Amino acid sequence: MKNSLREMICVGGALPGVTGNGANHMKNSLREMICVGGALPGVTGNGANHIKGVWKNMENRNLNELMREYQKAAHGEAKISAMKAAVRQADLEKDIRNQLQIRLDLVEESIFYGDTMDALVTFPQLLAMEEENSDFVDTYDVLWAFKWILTGATDFPQISLKEIDSYLGEYKKRCKENGYSLRSYYHKKRSVYQDIDEEKAKEANWKMQMCRQDYLCDCKACELNAQVDYDLRTGQVDKAFEEVKPILNHLLACAEVPGQTYCTLMTYFCKQRHRKKSKKYFDLLYPIVFKRKAMGLTGETAGEMLYYCSLYDRAQGIEIFQKLIKEELDVRNPRYKMLFAKGAYQLFHALQEEREFINISLPQIPVEKTKDGYSVAELAEMYYHEYVEIAKRFDERNGNTYYMEQIK
C-alpha cells in the first residue's frame, strides 16, 4: 500500500523522502492529473491563462501571505489554485507542519468543492510525509482524508480494483492500529462495491451494522443518506422510506444532505415514472445545487437532473445544460463526465421528438453550429458516444456491465 500510494505522486515534482519508481506509475496510469505549477490537462484558453496568472502573482509572496490568500478565497478553483501556491512555497521553505496542513486542506477542498483529482494527487504525498513526520500532524485528520480518498478513487477507472482494495486494506489497518472502530471502513467498502460486487457490498453492509460508531464515522445525516441509497438499490424500498424520514423532516442535515437525498429520491421516482413525486424532489434539489455550486454535489446530481428533465421538463433541461456545460468541459473526474454525458444524451434524445435544431449559445464543442442552430440528433449522438466510451472503461475495470446497462 505504501508503495502504490507513493506512486500516485505528480504534484510539484519530486517529493522529499519518495524516490525511485514513485513518480512514474501514476503519470502513466492517471495522465489526466494536474501537476502543480505546470499545464492543466483539459483546461485550455482563458482557464489555463487565468491559473498561470494566479501563479505568477503568487510566486513572490511568503508562506503566511499565501495561506491567508487561500483562507480568504472563495471555494472552488480560486481556493484550490491558492492552496497549490501555498503548497509549493511550504515545500520551498521546508516548513513540514504547513506542508502537511495545507495538503490536508487541499484534499478537503478538492473533495467537496473540486473534481477530486487534486485530492487523489495530493494525498499520497501527504501520507508519505506523515509516515516520517507523524509528530507534526494529527493521525485523526489524516484518516479522515484517507476515508474521502477511498471513494474518490473509484471515480477514476485508471485506478484498478487491486489498488482500491489495497487502499481499503491500509485504511483498515490504520484504524485498528489507532483504536478506531471499523464501522467507517465497512461503510466505505460498501460504497466502493455497491456498483461492482453485490455480495461484497452486502457483507460490508452487514458488518458495518455490527460496529460501534465513533469519531471517524460520517455524520449521522451522511451515514443515513448512504444507507437509504443502498437500500433503494437493493430493493428494500419500505425500509428506505422509513429510514429517510429524519432527513425529510429536517431533523438531520449537513453540507451534502439533504441535497444528495433529494437526488436519490428524484431518480428513484423518475425510474418509477411517478411524475408528481419526482418533481417534488427535483424542485427541492434545484436551488441547493445552484446555490451551493459545490463540484461534488453538482457532479453527482447534474446528470440525474437532466434525466428528470428529459422525461418531464425539456425546456428546463436545456437551461440546466447551458448552466453546467462549461463546468463539465473543464472537469477532470471521469465519473462526473460520464454521468453528465448520460443525462445530456437522455435529454437530447428525448428532445428529438419536438425539434430538429436548438438555437442556443454554447462553448466550443465537437458539434458544429449551423444557421439553424445545433442539430439535436448530433448532440444526442455526441453525448451517447462520450458516455459509452467512459462507461466501457469503468465496466472493464469493475469486471461487469453495470454502466453500459444504464444507457439501454
Image: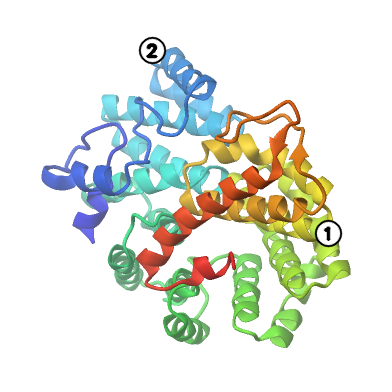
Q: Secondary structure at mark 1?
A: helix
Q: Residue 17: x, y in percent?
A: 16, 42
For the point 64% across and 53% down, the residue is: 345
Q: CA distance from mark 2 to mark 1?
A: 54 Å
Reply above or below: 278 against 93: below
Q: Is residue 145 left or right of residue 372?
A: left
For the point 29% across and 36% down, the residue is: 96
Residues 256 and 129: in front is 256
Residue that badge 2 annotates = 60
Q: Amino acid at mark 2?
A: Asn
For the point 72% across and 55% down, the residue is: 305
The quadrant where residue 9 appears: top left
Colour treatment of the image? rainbow
**The C terminus sits in image quarter:** bottom right
Residue that badge 1 annotates = 312
The quadrant where residue 366 appears: top right
Residues 308 and 206: in front is 308
Whether residue 217 is visible, yes or no, is: no
Task: Pick out the residue farthest to the right.
Answer: 276
Q: Secondary structure at mark 2?
A: loop
For the point 59% across and 76% down, the residue is: 230
Q: Amino acid at mark 1?
A: Tyr
Of the image marks 2 and 1, the number of the one nearer the N terminus: 2
